[in-house]
Image (tube, rainbow, N blue to C red):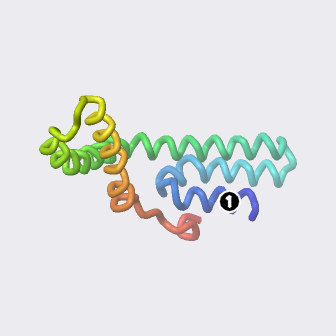
Amino acid sequence: MTFESGVLAFASRFVSARSFELIVAPALADLHFENSTGRGGRFGSRVSVLCALAGAAQEDLRRGSADFLKLTLLSFCYFIFPLTLGMRIFKTWSEFGVAAIIVLVMSLIPVMVCFWPERDAVGSRE
């Protein structure tokens, strides 16, 4: 697997098509141009592509974080309600807090499984 194919494989799963086209694709084009002309070092060019990939992933996380938080809180409220009805089984507030944190972590699972966005195939972007 070459460096470029690894970047494309990662981007096809974790980066949206918009972020790929605006951020990662120009960095890959610069890498290809610099390698073909012999200008610049291989390491520096690859680091710039990795920085672009990290920036694209960060942009996608920032753009979708509000919806993800809303869905997680909806799932948390659904699962915490029965726990609050049986609150008398806990002897201290710290026991209830630990149980609530476990419920919060477990409420992330259905949100990640059901609402993970589908990504485009790598070949359709080129």
Position of residue 49 measured from the top left corner of the image (x, y, whole percent): 67, 46
Q: What is the residue that sits farthest to the left in this orientation?
A: 85
Outermost residue, right direction? Answer: 38
Secondary structure, mark 1, is: helix
Q: Nearer the viewer, residue 67 or 52?
A: 67
Most foreground residue, 9 or 85: 85
Count the labels in the image. Answer: 1
Residue 32 in the figure: left or right of residue 112:
right
Q: Position of residue 41 (x, y in %)?
A: 84, 42
The 10 Å Cα crowd at callout 1, few under 14, some 14 to 19, many 20 or more, is few
The answer to whether residue 33 is left or right of residue 82 is right
Q: Position of residue 38 (x, y in %)?
A: 87, 48
The quadrant of the picture occupied by the N terminus is bottom right
- Residue at 68%, 53% in the rendered image: 29
Asked if residue 71 is positioned above or below residue 5 in the image, the reply reads above
Q: Which residue is mark 1?
A: 6
Name the one closer to the observer, 109 or 54: 109
> The disc labelled 1 sits on which kind of residue?
Gly
Name the residue located 44 percent from the left edge and 44 percent from the top edge. Answer: 61
- Quadrant where the C terminus is found in the figure: bottom right
Residue ID at (19%, 41%): 89
Residue 44 relative to residue 116: left or right: right
